[in-house]
């Protein structure tokens, strides 16, 4: 399986992306789903959420 390629590599987070992250996290979406909808890597999404104290639910 090929590794996903992200066009937005190392790009700063915009306010609308941060708002979308908060909204999706509040709805209980998982990290993978949130990252895909924001077109960001899971690692980038996780780091940004941690910095901004946004809790992302763990999928079981």
Image (tube, rainbow, N blue to C red):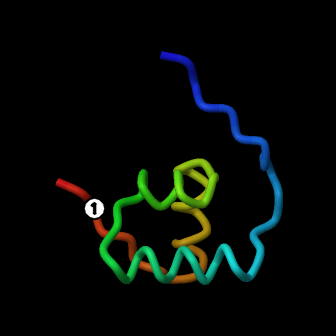
Q: Nearer the viewer, residue 36 or 56?
A: 36
Residue under the image location 38 percent in, 83 percent down: 26
In the figure, 39 relative to 56: above or below?
Answer: above
Q: Residue furthest right?
A: 11
- Image coordinates of residue 1 in percent, x first then y, are 47, 16
Q: Nearer the viewer, residue 8 or 53?
A: 8
Q: Which residue is under mark 1?
A: 58
User: Circle 1: is it few (<14), some (14-19), or many (20+) Cα within 10 Å?
Assistant: few
Q: Quadrant of residue 16?
A: bottom right
- Image coordinates of residue 21 in percent, x first then y, are 54, 74
Q: Residue furthest top?
A: 1
Q: Quadrant of residue 31?
A: bottom left
**Count of all numbered marks drawn on residues in the image:** 1
In the figure, 19 relative to 17: above or below?
Answer: below
12 left or right of 2? right
- Image coordinates of residue 54 in percent, x first then y, are 47, 80
Q: Quadrant of residue 45?
A: bottom right
Q: Residue furthest front?
A: 37
Residue under the image location 44 percent in, 74 percent down: 24
Residue under the image location 64 percent in, 78 percent down: 18
Does dot 1 land on a helix, a strand or a loop?
A: loop
In the figure, 22 relative to 11: above or below?
Answer: below
2 left or right of 6? left
Residue under the image location 38 percent in, 71 percent down: 56
Locate the C terminus by quadrant. Answer: bottom left
């Amino acid at each position: 399986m090929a590794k996903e390629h992200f066009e937005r590599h190392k790009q700063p987070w915009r306010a609308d992306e941060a708002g979308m992250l908060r909204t999706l996290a509040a709805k209980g979406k998982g990290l993978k789903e949130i990252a895909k909808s924001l077109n960001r890597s899971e690692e980038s999404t996780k780091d940004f959420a941690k910095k901004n104290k946004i809790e992302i639910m763990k999928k079981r």
